[in-house]
Amino acid sequence: AVANAHPHALSGGMRQRVALTRTLLVDPTLVLLDEPFSALDYETRLMLEDDVMALRDSYGTSVVLVTHDIEEAIAMSDRVVVLGGRPACIEQDIPIELTLAEHRNAVSSREAPEFRQYHARIWAALRSPMPHQSKGAA
């Protein structure tokens, strides 16, 4: 329905899908995503999370996702690396293993029994003082 539409006429979600499709046309082995869904409504975010996970699963493409959304990080990732400090340092490297009754997608990931535990662990890591910084460092 929107195949001939001008870019300005597309919704934010459609523009993000077009951008992702353009990236995939070159058959990359690695895709870097920096807050790709931050300006989208929740339903569109979940759909695009599914698109990225399908890309990873179908083509073996590695995806590095930078996000401030803990749920998004857990739902989409095989591991979450928590950065902190200035300059940024790795605070924690957390492998994500979810027990799922069905194929992993944006919704089923959030329903995994371990999901809340991972969320609490990552939240705690973000809230704790950075051990590599000296006292008084900003």
Image (cartoon, helix red, strand yellow):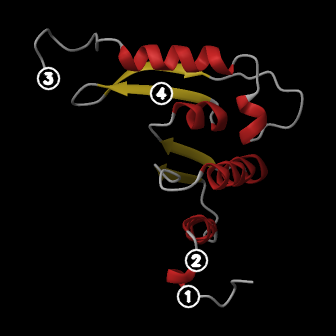
- Quadrant assignment for the C terminus: top left
Q: Residues within 10 Å of mark 1 (few under 14, many from 20)?
A: few
Specify the label residue 126 is tagged with: none
The residue where tag 4 is placed is 81
Near-viewer residue (25 or 21):
21
The residue where tag 3 is placed is 138
- Name the quadrant containing residue 73: top right
Q: Considering only order in the chain, which callout, 3 or 2, is on the residue closer to the N terminus? A: 2
Left or right of 2 on screen, residue 35: left
Q: Position of residue 30 (x, y in %)?
A: 56, 52
Left or right of 70 on screen, residue 77: right
Mark 1 → mark 3, Cα distance in angstroms: 46 Å
Residue at the far left in the pictured view: 136
Q: Amino acid at mark 3?
A: Ala
Mark 1 or 4, closer to the camera: 1
The residue where tag 2 is placed is 10
Q: Considering only order in the chain, which callout, 4 or 1, is on the residue closer to the N terminus? A: 1
Specify the label residue 6 is tagged with: 1
- Name the quadrant containing residue 129: top left
Element class at badge 3: loop
Element class at badge 4: strand
Q: Amino acid at mark 2?
A: Leu
Q: Position of residue 3 (x, y in %)?
A: 69, 85
Mark 2 or 3, closer to the camera: 2
Mark 1 or 3, closer to the camera: 1
Mark 4 or 2, closer to the camera: 2
Q: Position of residue 83 (x, y in %)?
A: 37, 27
